[in-house]
Amino acid sequence: MHTIQDLIELIKTNNPAADTTMVELAYDFTAQAHAGQKRLDGTDYVQHSLATAYTLAKLKLDLDTITAGLLHDVPEDTEVTIEAIEKNFGKEIAKLVKGITKLGKIKYRGLERYAENLRKMFVAMAEDVRVIFIKLADRLHNLNTLDALPPVKQQRIARETLEIYAPIANRLGIGELKGQLEDAAFKYVYPDEYAWTTKVASERYEMQKAVVNKMIKAIKALLADNKIEVVNIGGRIKHYYSLYRKLLRKDMDISKVYDLVALRIVVKDVASCYQVLGLIHSQWKPMPGRIKDYISQPKPNGYRSLHTTVFGKDGAIVEFQIRDLDMHETAEYGIAAHWHFKEGGKNKVVSLPPEQLKWIKELLDWQKDVKDNDQYLHLLKIDIFQNRIFVFTPKGDVIDLPEEATPVDFAYYIHTHIGHTTSAAKVNDKIVPLEHKLKSGDVVEILVDKNRAGPNEDWLKFVKTNQAKSHIKNFYNKKRSRLLDFFSRGK
Ligand code: MN
């Protein structure tokens, strides 16, 4: 359990120049508003507010977000109004609290309500993504105190976390929070699998520990000999749920999972990353097909690092992840890193959504056209929550699409006009049919025919993205209304 002093201390550690007066005031204000209220686990309500704010501070977010985290349940669960919050804490903080309050409590109370809440959530996210950071932090504490709830509610909250919140954290690139949310929910949704996974992982880890420690020693010496400045070296253990998902793809055979423990090396710049990679390969043989350069080709959520898997002595197989401090921040905090304190104590607030937020805008574009909630949830699962593949343009730009996407989906992703005039497609330099299913790593080239009148309506049978579907449908709707117009005028 955290105290307000812990919270202040954490904020000061991240940013010694921070003025925490507002945070302290918000704590007193919240404690008073929730006075007498208890959580189901018997603790004072304000503990929940504090835990939420603490998670936000761990993400190194700005003071407004942390303050709003403290206040997040006040308008919903107490007599104190949003106007009173605005009067005491200003417009910016009130806006964030209002965003959270508007979301209400998302519950599986019937499909309608569930879909409605999701829609609201994406609107709130587009307005200010910090609202979702608060929601995720709120959710994490609710999961960590789930034991106090009846089993039916445990199931609902845990499932919702795996299906909605964790995928959102993932798409925002907040790796650490995503892992924590998943592991906390995993236990409740799949108790047997959870017990099995943790057992298998700890046995395997015991086996590998000695080898890994030897390897850390060896790599430290190697880097020192070559005068490479190291910020940090350490082993990181894979989160359980993500390990379990990987085991499902590897015949449940943990010896086929090479990154249970990965050695993470943080150095001071990009050039050093490649240097370290070279040194590792000069010492240990790399496993073919496992060298990944996410620096020159980042993952769509912004993740950058070099990965390689090598054969150590005594047959041990170890994965290395090499990055600089900047990449490390992005890997741990994703989009949240944009709100981090910058030198001089001032935090820089990004007003324009960065590239990694583009999908939210796209989602808003199509969600207003889909009235049927059943269909909406189905589409959302494909667009947001399904596994994504990464493909490349001929120039090497990375594009992420849902699994089983086709060249037509790719074309519409690039530009509506390219989609409309697509005549053929090449994948890895070979002509393929337009319904060809793309795979991660494919290089896709679209051949357009400028004289083409428009898309083929049959494409609707195989395209996967809602973007492609709605552009094709719109094209035909417009065409039909023009024809209708023409004939009615003719009469
Ligand atoms: Mn809450």
Image: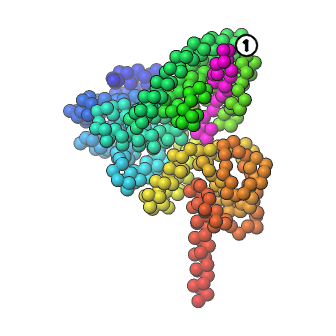
Mark 1, residue position: 226
> Within the magenta stretch, is there residue 308?
yes
Task: State whether label 1 is within 8 Å of ligand 1.
Answer: no
Q: Position of residue 314 (x, y in %)?
A: 66, 14
- Work out which quarter of the rendered image holds the N terminus and state it: top left
Location of residue 222 by image quarter: top right
Q: Amino acid at mark 1?
A: Asn
Q: Is residue 122 above or below residue 298?
A: below
**Which residue is at 61% across, 62% downward?**
461
Q: How many marks?
A: 1
Q: Position of residue 27 (x, y in %)?
A: 32, 30
Q: Which residues are magenta?
A: 299-320
Colouring used for the render:
rainbow
Q: Residue furthest bottom?
A: 491
> Within the magenta stretch, is there residue 367?
no
Q: Position of residue 361 (x, y in %)?
A: 54, 51
Res. 75 in view? no
Location of residue 287 by image quarter: top right
**Which residue is at 58% across, 39% downward?**
301
Tell me if 238 is positioned left or right of 78 in this view.
right
Q: Position of residue 276 (x, y in %)?
A: 70, 20
Q: Please tell me how crowded label 1 is: few (under 14), some (14-19), or many (20+) other residues with Cα within 10 Å.
A: few
Q: Is residue 440 above or below residue 211?
A: below
**Which residue is at 58% across, 70% downward?**
477
Tell me if 451 is positioned left or right of 482 in this view.
right
Q: What SS does tag 1 mark?
A: loop
Tell me if 198 is positioned left or right of 478 in this view.
left
Res. 108 in view? yes
